[in-house]
Image: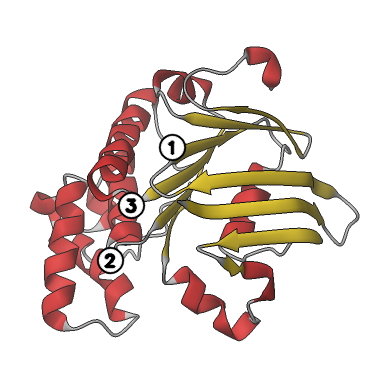
Amino acid sequence: MELIRLNDVTKQYRNGVTALYDINLKVRKGDFVFVIGGSGSGKSTLIKMLYREEKPTRGDVFVGGLNVKKIRNGKVYKLRRKLGIVFQDYRLLPKLSVYENVAFALEAIGAKKSEIHTKTLRALELVGLKSKVRSYPSELSGGEQQRVAIARAIVNEPKLLLCDEPTGNLDPEMSMEIMRILESINEATKTTIIMATHDKDIVNQMAKRVVVLKDGRLINDYEKGKYADEDI
């Protein structure tokens, strides 16, 4: 079943730069999709449109059947409550413990205390950090901090997890650890994952769908496996 659809999407910024040209893309529920391309290819712009940080200049973006372009600014939070978002910088709250950082996402939407406790521990278990509940971000490695960020993103059991260069600050070993965690989440929970990255090694080691952007255009869409180096 289809979860995401982009119809003839073009994005031009106010400074005149066109980041995306006539993008058509469909993503099914439960898919794991890499969006790859060099700097300036439009990867981050595409991700931002899925959580309505940006709106298309032309065309339509549908997420779960909703045309996100038509969501009023005051209602965008309702869309984002149904999504999980992971960024390159971990964006953890330094004065909160690991548990509190993850639980905060549920507290913000008024979840019951019992539900918060159960879901927070489950999310931390999925990312392998249940033993670090009382630790603080400053006591964690970069890879562990990103795992906390992932737990926070999945704690509300979203149907869609958006990852914008989540391994950009990590070394290759830690990067693959994060990828294994994302893969296990995808397989265990059927959460749809869309990940923007420029890391060729990660993409070529994972047998996932690969969407290739170049200069704002979708130039290839590989259903499974590796992509050609000349694509980027």
Q: Which mark is residue 150?
A: 3
Left or right: 231 with respect to 21?
A: left
Which three-letter amino acid code belongs to the residue tagged 3? Answer: Ile
Image quadrant occupied by the C terminus: top right
In this view of the protein, which residue sits in the foreground, 63 or 169?
Answer: 63
In this view of the protein, which residue sits in the foreground, 6 or 120?
Answer: 6
> Which residue is found at the position 33% from the left and 41% from the top?
182
In this view of the protein, which residue sits in the foreground, 43 or 134?
Answer: 43
> In which quarter of the view is residue 23 placed?
top right
Which three-letter amino acid code belongs to the residue tagged 1? Answer: Thr
Q: Earlier in the sequence, mark 2 or mark 1?
A: 2
Q: Residues within 10 Å of mark 3 (few under 14, many from 20)?
A: many
Q: Residues within 10 Å of mark 1 (few under 14, many from 20)?
A: many
Q: Is residue 141 visible?
A: no
Residue at the disc numbered 2: 101
In what element is the residue under mark 3? helix
Q: Residues within 10 Å of mark 2 (few under 14, many from 20)?
A: many
> In which quarter of the view is residue 134 placed?
bottom left
Q: Is residue 118 visible?
A: yes
Q: Which mark is residue 167?
A: 1
Relative image position of residue 39 (x, y in whole percent): 69, 35
Relative image position of residue 148 (x, y in whole percent): 28, 53
